[in-house]
């Protein structure tokens, strides 16, 4: 007695034997059934479709992909298909693999729920048939898929990259470039989504060894092959990054410190994003802000981001700022200058264009108000940090 | 042969007392009339609520409580009362205690709960009665006390209102305006928030400490958070004078009761209580460890707490800048003292002479080391003071973290 598998195989064989191409085989499979089939490549671009109103399945697949990007990636990792109901019909999503790795996605849309097994059998056979028709082009698709996955791993995730496909791709990418082993993360924002999209498309043209992705209105770039231990303007990678920024005057960027341990990349990504936030507000002329230039601010920004609003605000500094507001004084500014100069009275007075004795008097008033000794090293350190945190919160408030 | 108790009659007596709206003392008088066994009830701060036994009573602990109206802090701590109470709370019902202070005076003791909160303890001596009967009697009496307390007009007055207000304010930071205003009137600024933690579940201890710290007419309000944390808000503080005294007092409390305490910065408006609570929690997280402090103040350890938050956000490794890592590596590899030199130089406002004095070396040694440091990090330390100050702090944090990790 023939099985369902046999029947489908026979149908496909007949179509093949009749000289049909892949699309025609799909049409033959759909013929006389309330079924639509769509085959997409690894970037989810339609390759061929069959069945009545095949645009319906393209629209359904596009919507599904948009909503379940993460699940699609997992499907390729686990080789497991899944089914869903799009409000009108059922759809089977079947990842297609060749010997070299993932090569596309097969969608079968059907109206009768009981047809799931038939759809699965059909998808299994068609996926093999796809390999038969596309021996030549599989490698290119695979590479695209792996690079896209690797980019997501690098720029959006954290921890070790333990997927073997990514590891191999990473090793290959790392070896072929500059011979240097440093990385840096960059976070880039633009004046419009269009600018950002254009910049995203151009990254590889300017910096071939960079991985990039646009996420939540921000272009994230992982620069590779940088000389350790510090970012230098002479480094060829940073020179190319600079050329890229020059080409897009509407962009602002934050760049992390150079690092070598990829498992800590999520922290450096945050560092780049912090540099972007701080750099933008600090100096709009210099459009690239390097984390190492404002390391202490970056640390303060991270600390403030990890707690609730105002939690790390120092009550002493808030009181001082409040007094300034009420009495139109500049005690906070004076204290900041004094602590910043290493508690040097003459240098501070000179920098502020005031008399030394005036400064002395003002500092005395500040120490009375705060009830502390400004020249105690621990107090000075805490006050300096308090001022930094105050500015960070002010920036966030704006 | 043990005497059986008439539990049916006891149930009727208890019901009568509840319906007649008796006080707890009146309830105890009725209970004693029914079962003829000595009984006592005291609140979570070991203040006597009611008793029923002939005096002077043979069991010194109960006699002392009946005579003075409470058990002193010394008595509670030196006799390990809190250990017994913890067992009662953990079991949630009466159990027999016939060891320790109860060795010759076996008794059935259990917790009195009201709306899920521990409010008191109740004990009945076994004497010649059947243990199972006494246990059941103790549970019944506990429930009756709870019911009387629930409908007790006195309970609904100030203390309960204050307790609820404290919970709304300290736990949820969302008390209605009238309550906030009432609390602000009774407890004026400046405020300070303290989080007290026990290593494990110790509700009885925390309830007791709450009673000790937050007395009626005092300047603190508090409430329990879960079964291992106590939130206390101190009021009427003088920001200029009180911090050291408070820290001293809190250290005494922490050591005495085995607590870890995190203390917030001062604040003057009750609307800032959520921020203060988070500060105190951050400070409390820094306590403990083998040799760690038992009381940790947000103000005194501000830079450490900020560093800790930054490390939590970026990751430990990301927070130590490569310049400082390079110096630490050099120290490790060649036995140099670049990091401690840098620390001393930064702590002494970048004055080589002061740093040299602190390090007990010649001034030129510090100057030479600073030159070498400049070569290693590729720039003049004077030009990157902020980075070096924060970076060295982060390095020290990372070292401590790694040591604690090794110990664990």
Image: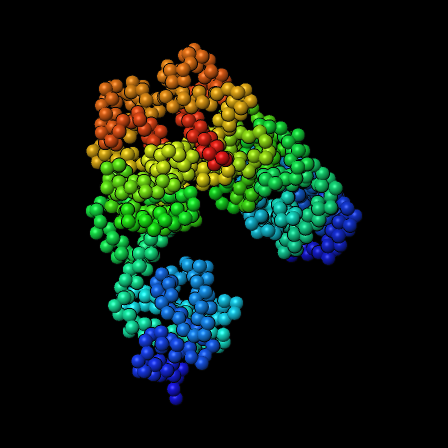
Q: Nearer the viewer, residue A63 or B151?
A: A63
Rendering quarter of residue B172: top right
Residue B82 image point, x, y percent: 55, 41
Q: Is residue A331 above or below residue B155?
A: above
Quadrant location, the N terminus of chain A: bottom left
Outermost residue, right side = B20
Which residue is drawn at the image coordinates 33% and 53% (left, top)? Answer: A151
Residue at position x 40%, y 62% from top?
Answer: A72
Q: Is residue B44 left or right of residue B329?
A: right
State the colouring used for the structure image: rainbow
Residue A268: quarter of image: top left
Q: What is the total number of numbered labels drawn onto the structure image? A: 0
**Residue A7, x across and y down, in percent:** 38, 83
Q: Identify which residue is drawn at 75% across, 52% down.
A: B15
Q: Can residue A22 be seen in this view?
A: yes
Q: Which of these two is toward me, A10 or A183?
A: A10
**In the rendered view, does B287 fall on the left or right side of B402?**
right
Q: Which of B387 and B57 is in front in this view?
A: B387
Does any portion of residue B46 appear in the rendered image?
A: no
Q: Residue B286: x percent and y percent?
A: 44, 37
Residue A379 higher or lower than B199, as above or below: above
Q: Nearer the viewer, residue B197 or B377?
A: B377
Residue B298 is left or right of residue B64, and the answer is left
Q: Residue at x 48, y 30 (%)?
A: A314
Which corner quadrant of the image does residue A136 belong to? bottom left
Q: Position of residue A42 (x, y in %)?
A: 34, 63
Q: In this view, does A170 lie above or below A342?
A: below
């Amino acid at each position: 007695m023939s099985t369902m598998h046999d029947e489908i195989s026979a149908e496909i064989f007949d179509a093949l034997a009749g000289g049909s191409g892949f699309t025609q085989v799909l049409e033959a499979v759909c013929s006389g059934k309330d079924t639509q089939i769509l085959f997409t490549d690894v970037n989810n671009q339609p390759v061929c479709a069959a069945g009545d109103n095949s645009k319906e399945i393209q629209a359904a697949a596009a919507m599904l992909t948009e909503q379940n990007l993460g699940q699609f990636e997992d499907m390729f990792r686990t080789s497991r298909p899944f089914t869903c109901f799009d409000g009108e019909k059922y759809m089977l999503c079947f990842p297609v693999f060749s010997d070299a790795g993932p090569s596309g996605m097969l969608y079968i849309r059907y109206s009768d729920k009981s047809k799931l097994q038939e759809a699965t059998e059909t998808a299994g056979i068609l996926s093999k048939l796809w390999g038969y028709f596309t021996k030549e082009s599989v490698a290119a698709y695979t590479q695209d898929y792996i690079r896209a996955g690797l980019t997501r791993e690098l720029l959006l995730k954290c921890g070790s990259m333990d997927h073997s496909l990514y590891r191999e791709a990473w090793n290959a990418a790392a070896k072929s470039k500059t011979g240097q082993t440093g990385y840096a993360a960059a976070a880039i924002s633009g004046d419009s989504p269009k600018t950002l999209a254009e910049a995203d498309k151009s990254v590889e043209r300017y910096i071939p060894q960079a991985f990039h992705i646009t996420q939540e209105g921000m272009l994230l770039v992982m620069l590779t092959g940088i000389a350790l231990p510090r970012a230098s303007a002479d480094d060829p990678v940073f020179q190319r990054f600079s050329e890229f920024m020059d080409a897009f005057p509407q962009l602002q960027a934050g760049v992390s410190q150079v690092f070598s341990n990829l498992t800590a990349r999520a922290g450096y990504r945050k560092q780049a994003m912090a540099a972007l936030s701080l750099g933008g507000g600090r100096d709009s002329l210099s459009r690239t802000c390097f984390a190492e230039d404002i390391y202490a601010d970056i640390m303060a920004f991270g600390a403030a981001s990890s707690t609730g609003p105002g939690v790390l605000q120092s009550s002493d500094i808030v009181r001082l700022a409040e007094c300034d507001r009420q009495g139109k004084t500049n005690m906070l500014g004076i204290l900041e200058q004094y602590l910043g100069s290493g508690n040097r009275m003459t240098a501070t007075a000179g920098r502020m264009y005031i008399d030394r004795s005036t400064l002395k008097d003002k500092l005395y008033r500040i120490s009375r108000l705060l009830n502390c000794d400004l020249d105690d090293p621990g107090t000075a350190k805490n006050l300096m940090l308090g001022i930094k945190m105050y500015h960070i919160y002010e920036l966030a408030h704006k | 042969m043990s005497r059986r108790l008439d539990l049916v009659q006891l149930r009727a007596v208890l019901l009568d007392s509840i319906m007649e709206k008796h006080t707890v003392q009146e309830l105890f008088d009725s209970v004693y009339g029914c079962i003829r066994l000595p009984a006592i009830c005291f609140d979570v701060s070991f203040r006597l609520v009611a008793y029923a036994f002939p005096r002077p009573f043979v069991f010194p602990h109960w006699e002392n409580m009946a005579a003075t109206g409470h058990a002193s802090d010394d008595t509670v701590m030196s006799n390990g009362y809190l250990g017994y109470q913890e067992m009662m709370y953990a079991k949630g019902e009466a159990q027999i205690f016939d060891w320790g202070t109860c060795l010759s005076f076996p008794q059935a003791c259990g917790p009195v709960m009201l709306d899920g909160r521990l409010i008191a303890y109740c004990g009945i001596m076994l004497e010649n009665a059947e243990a199972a009967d006494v246990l059941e009697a103790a549970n019944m009496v506990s429930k009756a006390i709870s019911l009387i307390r629930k409908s007790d007009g006195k309970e609904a007055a100030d203390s309960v209102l204050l307790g609820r207000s404290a919970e709304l304010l300290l736990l949820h930071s969302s008390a209605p305006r009238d309550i906030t205003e009432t609390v602000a009137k009774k407890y004026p600024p400046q405020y300070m928030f303290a989080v007290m933690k026990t290593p494990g579940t110790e509700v009885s201890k925390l309830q007791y400490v709450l009673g000790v710290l937050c007395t009626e007419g005092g300047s603190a309000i508090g409430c329990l958070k879960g079964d291992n944390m106590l939130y206390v808000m101190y009021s009427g503080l003088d920001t200029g004078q009180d911090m050291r005294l408070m820290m001293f007092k809190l250290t005494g409390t922490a050591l005495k009761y085995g607590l870890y305490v995190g203390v917030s910065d001062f604040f003057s408006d009750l609307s800032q209580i959520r921020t203060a609570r988070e500060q105190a929690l951050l400070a409390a997280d820094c306590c403990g460890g083998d040799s760690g402090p038992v009381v940790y103040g947000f103000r005194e350890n501000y830079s450490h707490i900020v560093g800790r938050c930054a490390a939590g956000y970026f990751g430990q490794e990301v927070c130590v800048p490569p310049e400082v890592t390079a110096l630490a590596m050099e120290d490790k590899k060649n036995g140099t003292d670049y990091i401690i030199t840098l620390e001393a130089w930064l702590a002494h406002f970048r004055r080589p002479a002061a740093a040299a004095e602190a390090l007990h070396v010649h001034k030129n040694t510090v100057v030479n080391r600073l030159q070498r440091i400049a070569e290693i990090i590729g720039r003049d330390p004077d030009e990157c003071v902020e980075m070096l100050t924060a970076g060295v702090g982060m390095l020290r944090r990372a070292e401590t973290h790694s040591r604690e990790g090794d110990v664990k």
